[in-house]
Image: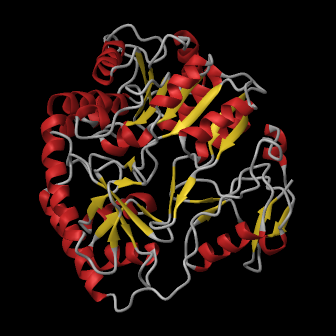
Amino acid sequence: MDKYENTPLIKALHNHVLQGRINMHMPGHKQGMGFSSAFQNNLLSYDLTELPGLDNYHNPTGAILKSMEACSEAFGALKSYFLVNGSTSGIHASFLSCFRKGDKVLLNRNCHISVINALILFGIEPIFVMPEYNKEYKLPIPASFDDWKNALYENPDVKGAFVTTPDYYGICQPITELSTLLHCEGKILIVDEAHGTHFPFSKLLPETALEQGADICVQSFHKTLPALTQSAVLHIGSALIDFEKVQRAISMITTTSPSYIVMSSMDYARDFAKRNGSTQYEKLLTKLDELKDQLMKMEKLRIVPDEIDGIKRDPTRIVIDTSLTDITGLELYELLYDEYGIVAEMCDTYHVVFILTMSNTSDDIAKIANAIIRIDKSIKNISSRTCYDNPPLSASISSKNYSVPDLYDFLGSTRQIQLEDAEGCVSAGLVTPYPPGIPLLCPGEKITENDIQYLKKLLTSGFDVHGLITAENGSKMVRII
């Protein structure tokens, strides 16, 4: 490494790898553990371009097309398209190909930031369907079918619905009834299934979006399968979707120099999961059941169950709840990182989330159990602090008082105001605690006192909040319309 004198990123990556930490985060290959040695050894030599025999991403007729067809077969799709810019590009291509400027779409409010950006880019008006809230575990849970049905009947001019399932905590929105209702009304259903790419490969996992009637679903291979970061796929599940239009949309927003190593890793991940997934997930889930049995005996920390209010969670996603203790999710995350060498995927005020995949070992799981149980025993008191619901999505959000701003007004807005003085102002930007990347404030939303207090609490606790501006005096500013 001495010859890399001015390479701060390489040095940071090298130092992190040397620490030998336990990866409980994406990507799913866990620093190459999920790849065969043959694939790893050849990976850089696969970094090629559109040469004879290697096909063309934007006009696939050979190897890329055959790989995407194998992907369709494995996932039960009518058509599948590789995405080399992550699920974000698939979400944007879905909006671009299925809706027109000014169209209305039903949308769960706790969606990913990429969805909000799609609304602004393409001028789509959302009809937000608010999540419910589980007070016991301080978690947002999916809106009920009745909420979606009422939103549809109150807004019969919507073109369809966009649903995120599972969410970052592994909570799965049931969508079979919703897809049936939408189709009866001539509407389409698009699903952000970025965190559920592994579902098709074991009957022990939740049903997939395609199995439940989604017309389009977008999946991030790199989150839970052995594939490189930015690996994702858009699947078409019904003839209601114009295949050619989707392909044109994907091509419009994708580089003309697509990565062959990213695409080859998707080819690898699909083949590996298809051949080995059933056996591998049975073994993984058996180990995780043992882990959960151990963690259920904790006295202060809690493991979030695999079902909440009758709604299933992804059993491979371990979520630890700190709400009954005097430590925050951030403090637990840092304890695990600093003292035990365990790197979780994310944390929020009361939770730490671990992503486990086929690439994790029995030793990884044993070390998680040991660390969390030891921390639980070290906590002296049950919490005396006042719980603060997370996050306080504004009850004022509705189709009557929310409108996506014009793209160029959004990009060009320069007016800033101190966060403390912003009550009643309209946000011109996305204000997003990240992760999990769920916007607290969207462009066009009115800022409430509850929003301000929640953001101040996050900042005081050391959380990273994107979208706020730091003034020269250190105060936090928010961009407003």
Q: Nearer the viewer, residue 116 or 187?
A: 187
User: How far from the left and from the top, in percent, is residue 333?
Assistant: 39, 72
Within the image, what quadrant is residue 262 found in?
Answer: top left
Q: Nearer the viewer, residue 379 or 6?
A: 379
Please name the residue shown 33% across and 71% down the image.
302
Left or right: 99 as drawn, with respect to 139? right
158 above or below 403?
above
Q: Quadrant location of the N terminus?
A: bottom left
325 above or below 29?
below
Left or right: 358 as drawn, with respect to 225? left
Question: What colour scheme does the image use?
Answer: secondary structure
10 above or below 95?
below
Q: Is residue 9 visible?
A: yes
Please name the residue shown 47% across and 25% down the image.
214
Query: In this view, which residue lies farthest toward the top?
Result: 61
User: How far from the left and from the top, in percent, is residue 367?
Assistant: 18, 69
Query: In this view, which residue lies farthest toward the bottom?
Result: 380
Within the image, what quadrant is residue 400 found in?
Answer: top right
Left or right: 402 as drawn, with respect to 296? right
User: How far from the left and from the top, in percent, is residue 179?
Assistant: 51, 26
User: How far from the left and from the top, in percent, is residue 373?
Assistant: 23, 77
Within the image, what quadrant is residue 34 found in?
Answer: top left
Number of marks drawn: 0
Left or right: 33 as drawn, with respect to 88? left
Q: Is residue 6 visible?
A: no
Please name the residue shown 84% across and 51% down the image.
413
